[in-house]
C-alpha cells in the first residue's frame, strides 16, 4: 500500500517489507532506523520508471522470503 512518508512512519510496524520510491531514496537510512527488523529497500529506478509492478512485487516477496 502506497503511503506518504509521514503516514508510513506512523504505521511502519504494520509492514512486512518497506519499499521506497527512488525519488525519496535519501530517506532510506531514516526509514531503516525506524523500521527495526522490517526489511527496507529502494525500488529499482528502472522498474519504477517503467511501472514494472511485477518486478517490484517480486522484489518485495524476495525480501519477505529472506526474513521468514
Image (cartoon, rainbow, N blue to C red):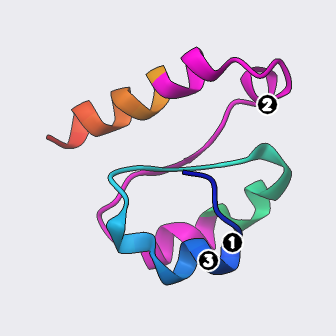
Packing grade of label 3 (10 A; few <14, some 14-19, many >=20) is: few
- Which numbered disc, 1 or 2, marks the residue that appears first in the sequence? 1
In screen coordinates, is 68 left or right of 8?
left
Q: Read off the magenta span.
A: 29-57
Residue 43: x, y in percent?
Answer: 65, 37
Q: Which residue is mark 1?
A: 5
Q: Is residue 40 positioned above or below 64 on the image?
A: below
Of discs 1 and 3, which sits in the foreground? 3
Residues 7 and 42: in front is 7
SS class, disc 1: helix
SS class, disc 2: helix
Q: Is residue 60 positioned above or below 21 on the image?
A: above
Q: Which residue is mark 3?
A: 7
The answer to whether the residues at label 1 and label 3 have Cβ atoms under 8 Å apart is yes
Residue 32 in the magenta stretch? The answer is yes
Residue lying farthest left?
Answer: 68
Q: Is residue 64 positioned above or below 16 on the image?
A: above
Q: Which residue is mark 2?
A: 45
Label number found at residue 64: none
Residue 8 in the magenta stretch? The answer is no
Of discs 1 and 2, which sits in the foreground? 1
Amino acid at each position: 500500500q502506497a503511503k506518504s512518508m509521514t503516514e508510513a512512519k506512523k504505521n511502519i510496524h504494520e509492514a512486512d517489507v518497506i519499499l521506497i520510491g527512488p525519488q525519496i531514496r535519501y530517506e532510506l537510512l531514516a526509514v531503516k532506523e525506524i523500521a527495526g527488523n522490517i526489511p527496507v529497500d529502494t525500488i529499482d529506478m528502472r522498474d519504477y520508471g517503467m511501472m514494472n509492478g511485477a518486478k517490484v512485487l517480486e522484489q518485495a516477496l524476495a525480501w519477505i522470503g529472506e526474513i521468514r
